[in-house]
Each structure stands twice: as C-alpha cells, then as structure tokens.
Amino acid sequence: MLSRIIIAVLLFAAGVGATWYYKDIVTVSKVSPATASAPQGGNRAVDVVTEKVTLGPVIETYDALGTAYANEAVTITAKVTGTVKAVNFEEGQMAKKGDVLIELDDREMRAALAQNEAELRNAKLLYERAQQLIKSQNIPQAKVDELLSSYQGITSKVEAARSRLADLKIIAPFDGRLGLRRISVGALLSQSTVVTTLDDTSVIKLDFSVPETMLSKLGVGRVIFTRNDVYPDMRFKGVVKTIDSRVDVVSRSVQVRAEIPNADGQIKPGMLMTVELPVAERANAMTIAESALVPEGSEQYVYRVVDGRAVKTSVKLGTRLGGNAEILSGLSETDAVIIGGVQKVRNGTRVKASEQTATTKG
C-alpha cells in the first residue's frame, strides 16, 4: 500500500515539472530577441516626392457651351418669278454690298417700261401745253386738272415698272461670304427658291447661358475666352455685348451674347464653342498639384511633411486649374506636401522626401 502511494506522488511531481517546462518553452518562443528589439511600425522611411505650396495669380472661371452665329446672315432668294439669265458669283467668294449676284430675263419688263415711259412723255407734254393755255383761258381748269392726274398716274406706273425691273437683279445686301450656288442659268426661279447664302463672319456672335446666380458677376464689356475642338491649341478672345432681359423660369438661366473678332474666318457659324468666363481674380493665391489631394467623402486632405513624418491635414479647395488646385485654407505658404507616393503613407509615417521644383516638373 505504501509503495503505491510513493509511486503516485512521484508521477504527480513529474507531471508538474513537465507542465512548468512546457510553459517556459512557450513563453520563450513568443518573445524572440528579433521582435523584442523592433519598435511598433518599423524604422524604415517611405520614399515620397514633395512640392512646396506655390503662390501666384489665380483666375476663377465659369465654363459654358455656346453656339456661334454670323454677325449678319441671310438666305438669298428671288423677289419675283423669272428665268435665270446670268450667274455673277462663284461659290465661297467674298461679296460687296450692292454686287449683282443673279440676273433674271428682263426683256418683257424692259418692253413694258419703255411703253410706260413713252406714255409718260406724252402725258407730260399734254400737261405742259395745258399749263400754257390756261394762262390765256383757252382751256378749262378741269381739263388741266385731268391732264395733271393722268401725268401723275403714268409717273407712278413708270416707277413701279422700274422697281419690278430692278427686282430682276438679285444683289448682295451687305458685305460677306457667299455659300453654295443652288441654281443654274436657265432655271426658273420662284420667290421660294434658294439661290445661295450670305454670311458676314468678320465678327461672330456667340450665344451661351449662365445660371441666374452668375448675374452679379457678369456685365456688358466683360472679357471671355472660347475654344473649339477644330482648333484645340487656339484660344479666341471676345467681349460680352448683351445680357438678356429675362431669366428662363424653367432652367433659371439667362442668355448672354458675346462678340468675337473673326477677320480670318476660322470660326464658322453653327460651331459649338467652349466658353471660359472669368468671374474672379486673386493675385496671391496658394496652389498645389492635384495629385496631392486625398478625398474622403466630402472632405479633402493632403499630407504635409513635418520633421520627417507625414502629417494628414484637412484643406479647403478653391478653383481647379488644369492639374493644380487652389487652397483657400489649411496650409501655409511655407508648407511642402506629398505629391508622389501618397498612397503609401498614413498619418505619422516616416518619410524620405525628394522635392520637386518648377524645373523638374513634367
């Protein structure tokens, strides 16, 4: 019996010793010398590219779409029905005011005018004789009045015939460029027949809309700039000439008309133009590259570099400027922000910064 008790005690002691030995092994394996000596987050600095805040003028613009119209435009048609006798223009040529573009057959009209003019000469002669006879009272006053009325009536007929004869010539109403010719010699023209078009494009009228909230920033004489995809590297300058007197009740916008010099004819009527309307200018604004921005919901953040670490900073944006963004608040003019490697850093991350300057951009 005693021997069994001794054996049980020895087995228990062996088990306890094994348990403490196992715990010691586990404890040693969890805390290795390598992990114990490394600080949380590591010591390695992240390579980033920084750029200092830039100070300079910023022009705030409102962008819109507009349609180009000719300064003067007309579709040339005939006033009377007639047969085309001569075409005196080439397609696309410049025309001067008063140039005869089309001549219609005028033989019948000239014959009618000649007859009316002969009647007029005879009526004038009879009236002048009557005036001489009235002095000697050899003709009653009523007859003189009758001859005067006849003379005046035939005068009106002659003037009407001359007007109809003039209508057989289609003339340019103003200086401009002619379009496509749509008739030929021998064609019968009616009053609805289109002969060609005439556009004065020396000045282009550009119509566009702005919201009613822009009215306080808009005025006649304000300079605008406009572009078209046909000439992507060109920027045309114009001036606001008219602001409509009414605001559209549906869109809450107002129509604006600007004029753009177009002596070389590059802008064609009907073109879709992109309008840049400068509405405010700030002479000493802060700007940074858009690549520095980190959006989170409706907020915008940047990472400043302070004492070798990334510091997450909330900023308020102004206008966007083609790759740059204006900073209204959150930064100072001495700050440098991370523009390359932003996705690799967090607030407090150690960084190794290489600065990008104006000479290294692009």
Image: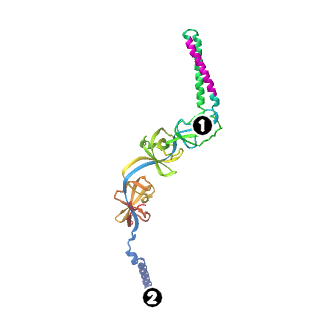
Q: Residue at x 39, y 51 (%)?
A: 58
Which amino acid type corresponds to the residue marked 2 in the rendered image?
Ile
Task: List the residue tagged with mark 2.
Answer: 5
Q: Main secondary structure of the magenta part?
A: helix
Q: Quadrant of the C terminus?
A: bottom left
For this view, does 30 lie left or right of residue 199?
A: left
The answer to whether residue 250 is visible is no
- Estimate how packed mark 2 is, as few (under 14), some (14 to 19) or many (20 or more) residues with alpha carbons within 10 Å: few
Q: Which residues are magenta?
A: 111-133
Please provide percent x and percent y for residue 142. 58, 12
Q: Which quadrant of the structure image shows residue 147?
A: top right
Dot 1 or dot 2, earlier in sequence: 2
Q: Is residue 268 magenta?
A: no
Does the magenta run of residues contain 118? Answer: yes
Q: Position of residue 299 (x, y in %)?
A: 43, 56
Residue 10's x, y, as percent? 44, 87
x%, y% of residue 324? Answer: 42, 56
At x 58%, y 28%, the residue is 163
Q: Amino acid at mark 1?
A: Ile
Q: CA distance from mark 1 to mark 2?
A: 138 Å
Choose top left, top right, bottom left or bottom right for residue 144. Answer: top right
Residue located beneath label 1 in the image? 102
Up-down: is 296 above or below 103?
Answer: below
Of residues 268 and 314, the one nearer the viewer is 268
Q: Foreground mark, 1 or 2?
A: 1
